Amino acid sequence: MNNPSTPRILLDTSFLLPTLGFDVSSQSVYAAPETIAHSNIEPHYCDMNLLEASWQAVRALKRNEFDRNTFRDGLQSIENGERYHEIETTAKAYEIVIDLYSLVM
């Protein structure tokens, strides 16, 4: 994180899928990285995003629509690049998710 006052967002996995070589139907997903790059928003991901993306990879593999090299390059870009920032997923974070979810039930 560069600046504590910089707005931070936790990306939905769908916003990471194009980086991993997956086609997605939403144009807003493709436009998001460009929009974020030209703003002061700091995009974050967590290990659960990558787990969910790996499930997508398994489904694509079963359909013979999986490019392992593109997926690997995308993972390296996400993990080692400067665009996305990883956040640590803690037990407390899971509790907060459950609490938030209970508010909409």
Image (cartoon, grey):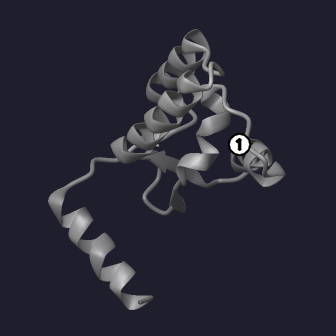
Whether residue 68 sits left or right of residue 47 in the image: it is right
| Residue bearing mark 1 | 33
User: At 52% across and 38% down in the image, what residue appears?
Assistant: 84
**Residue 52, placed above or below residue 23:** below
Q: Can you say which quadrant of the picture contains the C terminus? A: bottom left
- Camera-side residue: 67 or 2? 67
- What amino acid type is highlighted by mark number 1? Pro
- Camera-side residue: 9 or 51? 51
- Which of the 4 quarters of the picture holds residue 96? bottom left
User: At 58% across and 35% down in the image, what residue appears?
Assistant: 83
Whether residue 43 sits left or right of residue 32 in the image: it is left
Horizontal and vertical percent position of residue 99 = 29, 81
**Residue 14, placed above or below residue 23:** below
User: At 73% across and 42% down in the image, what residue appears?
Assistant: 24
Horizontal and vertical percent position of residue 64 = 62, 18
**Residue 46, placed above or below residue 12:** above
User: At 64% across and 30% down in the image, what residue appears?
Assistant: 19
Number of numbered callouts drawn? 1
**Residue 20, placed above or below residue 95:** above
- Which of the 4 quarters of the picture holds residue 7? bottom right
